[in-house]
Image (cartoon, grey):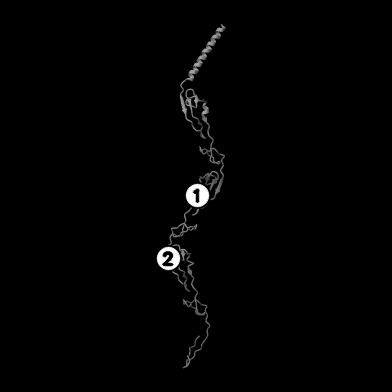
Amino acid sequence: MKRKIQLLLCVIAMMALCLTSCFLFENDEHEHSIEHVEAKAATCTQVGNIEYWYCTECEIVCTDSAFTQQIELANTVVNKLAHEYTNTCDAHCKNCGELTNENAAHTVEHVEAKAATCTENGNVEYWYCTVCGSAWTDEAKTQVTNLKNVVIPETDHEYLNACDAHCMHCGELTNESASHTVEHVEAKAATCTENGNVEYWYCTVCGSAWTDEAKTQVTNLRSVVVPATDHEYLNSCDAHCMHCGELTNENASHTVEHVEAKAATCTENGNVEYW
């Protein structure tokens, strides 16, 4: 009886094994419902994945479309990348733009404001980082700007007169098309009452002067003047100039002698009394 029971249990075990084998065989041969997942690159904010295929029924994952290279689903994941920075002082990741480097510190220099001139740009007062070039218009670094916006462009050249060829500030020749309005003045001899002048040419607009018509010998309107001559006298006791006749020697003093009157005769002239 005991043997019969053992034999029955053995038959039952064999039937169970057969059923299990059939189930496994049928399960292995089922028609998979396969979906394809494209590869996706990882970023600094999101994981990526490799390319893979998986069955939506049995959740088997493979790395080939023939569904022969099986792997774990976890192994399809590509981890996030590290955040990257253009400069060591950058607080924000250059890829995602997020604040991810809170310990970053700028190396800041201060630049004083400088007025622009006609030969050089100026600038507003600003602070900037010598490492990354970031710039601010306040020391607290709350007013962000850039190194282009701090520049004050050069001013225009200026001229006292429309005919000036040289800038009144820098003195450079910057108005080559300038044209003088020129008049010619003949030479005139000086007198004791009036200045004279050398021959010259001058601009009626700006007052520039030259001693030649080609305007190569530069002078000025003071230098062309020939000063008035001194008054002259026939005698040291003359009070009036012999040229202009004006009373110009008020300190002149005569050396006076008195002559008595004398009657004329038939042989000699006479004279009235005189001094």
Residue at 52%, 30% (x, y): give it. 77
The image quadrant that residue 82 belongs to is: top right
Placement of 93 over or under 225, stated as above or below: above
Residue at 54%, 11% (x, y): give it. 10
Viewer-nearest residue: 193 or 176: 176
Q: Residues within 10 Å of mark 2 (few under 14, many from 20)?
A: few
Viewer-nearest residue: 151 or 21: 21
* Picture disc at residue 151: 1
Name the amino acid type tagged 1: Val
Placement of 214 over or under 27, stated as above or below: below
- Give the structural element (helix, strand or loop) at label 1: strand
* Picture disc at residue 136: none
Residue at 46%, 27% (x, y): give it. 36
Q: Residues within 10 Å of mark 1 (few under 14, many from 20)?
A: some
Please name which of the two marks, 2 or 1, marks the residue nearer to the observer. Answer: 2
Query: How many labels sit on residues?
Result: 2
Residue at 53%, 28% (x, y): give it. 75
Residue 155: give x, y in percent of width and height: 48, 53
Name the amino acid type tagged 2: Glu
Residue most extreme to the top: 1
Residue 204: give x, y in percent of width and height: 43, 64
Label 2, label 1: how many angstroms apart (C-alpha)?
A: 45 Å
Residue 80: give x, y in percent of width and height: 53, 33
Placement of 80 over or under 225, stated as above or below: above
- Which is more N-terminal, label 1 or label 2? 1
Q: Are marks 2 and 1 in contact (CB under 8 Å)?
A: no
Residue 145: give x, y in percent of width and height: 50, 45
- Give the structural element (helix, strand or loop) at label 2: strand
Q: Which part of the image, by quadrant, shows the N terminus?
A: top right
* Picture disc at residue 183: 2
